[in-house]
Image (cartoon, rainbow, N blue to C red):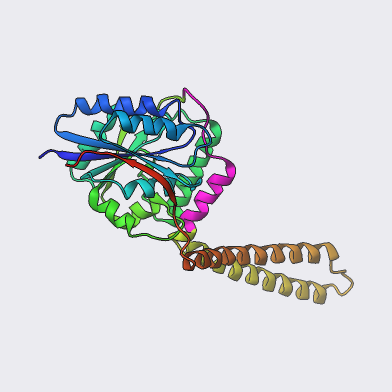
Amino acid sequence: MSQLISFVIPCYRSAQSIGGVVEEIEEAMKGLPAYRHEIILVNDASPDDTYEVIKTLCSANRHICGVNLARNFGQHAALMAGFAYVRGDIVVCLDDDGQTPANEVGKLLAGIEAGSDVVYAKYVHKQHSGFRNFGSKINELMTRVMLGKPKELYISSYFAAKRFVIEEMLRYQNPYPYVIGLVLRTTKKITNVEVTHREREIGTSGYTIGKLLGLWFNGFTAFSVKPLRIATVAGVLSACMGFAYGIFTIIKKFLNPNVVVGFSALMAALVFFCGLILLMLGIIGEYLGRIYISLNNSPQYVIRECVDERDAD
């Protein structure tokens, strides 16, 4: 029997675009007769009528599953919700806005067939806004420093993964999922394939500064203790600087008893060290807060409704 491909698409404000994405997937899969496919559409509490469109798509197509979240949990939580409904041997994740080319999915599947566990799409020319490109660069740096991502590996929202990778990701039950971190801790057999990135034709990106900051916090507090180690190193360096400055002040006073020790220098040092201490306490507090929330069994997502009339395999 041919392999089943599960497409998982988190949807937010995509009432006008998701139909086109689904249609493109259908056309692309007609050119890949060696595979069967299903589509899981996860509505992340869109304020528009995205879920109504999803229900219409489900009623018209027997291999589409629609999941409606009770509130906005974010893209990564929506992906995790979709993963719980996949049946396929290979899972493909892409965006709902049409910027990720579904008609090039064959390239990702070829990478999986070649032996990779996960294949990420790599864009030669990204068509995101300057803000999104800046956010991507920060995310790239964070994943490389905090999560140990290889420098040459390009990470994007368009990727294909083998079923065992998805099953391992689903074992993560904490309320702060970060898909990239889950992939990197599961396997090192990850490759890139080049695809085209399109300009957004409808709407604007749902990512704001607040959401991007929250995503980065999820990444380095859920899957790395490096921020705590950086805090330790910064504390040691600050203590050494303070000690060295104290020695310098004593020596200067001995060499020139008439010199007046500067009040401004003292205040500058005091403000610097106090700010550094508060920063380190904030990082520790962030970890403790997330541990507390995890111990309270806060859910990754809450499903309000699901439309699943997929035909049995």
Is 215 in the magenta? yes
In this rendering, is residue 145 above or below 306? below
Residue at figure coordinates x 28%, y 39% from the top left: 309
Is 208 in the magenta? yes
Q: Seen from this angle, which residue lies furthest right?
A: 258
Q: Give x and y (percent) for residue 141.
A: 47, 48
Q: Quadrant of residue 2?
A: top left
- On the picture, is 275 further left or further right than 83? right
Viewer-side residue, 210 vs 123: 210
- On the picture, is 275 further left or further right than 122? right
Residue at figure coordinates x 25%, y 50% from the top left: 189
Q: Give x and y (percent) for residue 177.
A: 43, 54
Query: In this rendering, does residue 47 appear at all?
Result: yes
The C terminus, quarter of image: top left
Viewer-side residue, 214 vs 259: 214
| First to last magenta residue range | 201-220
Residue at figure coordinates x 25%, y 35% from the top left: 63
- On the picture, is 13 further left or further right than 107? right
Q: Give x and y (percent) for residue 36.
A: 18, 35
Q: Give x and y (percent) for residue 124.
A: 38, 30
Helix, strand or loop: magenta stretch:
helix
In this rendering, is residue 149 above or below 26? below
Q: Quadrant of residue 6?
A: top left
Q: Seen from this angle, which residue lies furthest left?
A: 1
Total numbered badges shown on the rendered structure: 0
The N terminus, quarter of image: top left
